[in-house]
Image (cartoon, rainbow, N blue to C red):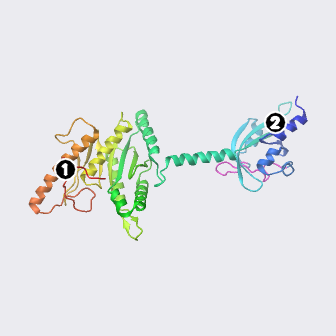
Amino acid sequence: MVSASLEHDILEHLYDGVYVVDRQRVIRTWNPAAQRISGFTAGEAVGRRCRDNLLCHVDDRGRQLCRRGCPLAATMKDGQPREQRVYLQHREGHRVPVEVRASALRDEHGVIVGAVEIFTDNSRGERERRRLQELEKLAHVDGLTGIANRRCFDLALEERLSRLTSSGAGFGLLLIDIDHFKAVNDTHGHPMGDRVLRTVARTVALGMRLGDSVARYGGEELAVLAGGSDRGGLMELGERLRALVERSTTPAEDGGRLAVTVSLGGAVALRGDTPESLLARADGALYVCKRAGRNMCTVAEGRLPASTVPATDGASSQPAGLTAAGAPATGSPRAIAVELAHQRFAHARQRDQEQRAATGIPTWRSRGASHAVTPLLAAGSAAPAS
């Protein structure tokens, strides 16, 4: 049997705070660690009830547990031990995170006559938890734009594909590239380029639907994962984001404002897709946009890109598949996209030449463009720089 003096020595040297209450929840024992953690001395604590404006435990939501939800009171009622993370009120007024463990005390007949609460200072653990959360956030957030970074995107894409396989939860991918971004940097300087990138990233982030996510994919390129999207929904989202960016401006140091446009290439995830195959289809669709004049959205249809055929003045742009006669049945997505782009431009150039013969004025426009564009790219010509 442990002697009373030994029990006292144990309580005196415990790292954890310990206090004992009787059936009226009046504090009868208060060890030095309890004083160290709470700031209250034994003389201030013993003889008072724990709920008498002493520790005043609250939970993560700030709810007062002394009035409702007190683990010590619940343990004294049913005899069951409890553990909970709470915040006690320090003598100086601030809150201290602690882990509390409450156990009932019984007499020789098994009747509950009081309870003991042991509380561990969790300040260090709480600081470490917050530090790890901050580090995790920094590891997944792009420092320039404030949106998710490439690492976060890669993890999210893997997770979405896994959910597609296991539960059939569909989604789409949009790759967004800022048009002529190199010219922005060369003409206005890299600080202005950074501001433009932030403007575009924030516009896209605020223009998405609930459940969508955006990340900086690399350089001036963003990637959007759109939940539950079919091809039509993905095209609609892409067009909205394109239009929002086109109508956004970034303030320049000279007092002016700079506007840019974006090109978007998308693909709907299919069962059996890998990150590489899905990205390749979206990248192929984006390449078609670049060849077609930029400032437009193209979404792959199945395994091949599909888009909108550029319209002449007075005519609306009608969706059209790019699986025209002569399209390659095999090959890499990039090669297929290039060949299909060649077919589109051959058709566009023929149509433009017919207009030139009739009117003498080139009026061919790329989708979303606000100025006339002469289709000079023909099959076999070099792709324009990004």
| Relative image position of residue 381 (x, y in whole percent) | 20, 49
Q: Which mark, residue 345?
A: 1
Q: Residue furthest bottom?
A: 255
Callout 1 touching callout 2 (CB < 8 Å):
no
Q: Is residue 286 magenta?
A: no
Splitting the image into 4 quarters, where does residue 168 fall? top left
**x 43%, y 61%: residue:** 191
| First in residue order: circle 1 vs circle 2 | 2
| Relative image position of residue 158 (x, y in whole percent) | 43, 38
Q: Which mark, residue 252?
A: none
**x 18%, y 61%: residue:** 363
Alpha carbon distance from label 1 to label 2 = 86 Å
For this rendering, which residue is in front, 53 or 293? 293
Asked if residue 294 lies left or right of residue 27, the reply is left
Asked if residue 52 lies left or right of residue 192, the reply is right
Label 1: how many Cα within 10 Å (few below 14, some 14–19, many 20+): many
The residue to which callout 2 is attached is: 105
Q: Main secondary structure of the magenta part?
A: loop
Q: Can residue 268 be seen in this snapshot? A: no
Magenta-drawn segment: 48-65
Q: Secondary structure at mark 1?
A: helix
| Relative image position of residue 81 (x, y in whole percent) | 73, 36
**x 44%, y 42%: residue:** 154
**Amino acid type of the residue tagged 2 in the rendering:** Leu
Q: Secondary structure at mark 2?
A: strand
- The quarter of the image holding the N terminus is top right
Q: Can residue 93 be seen in this snapshot? A: yes
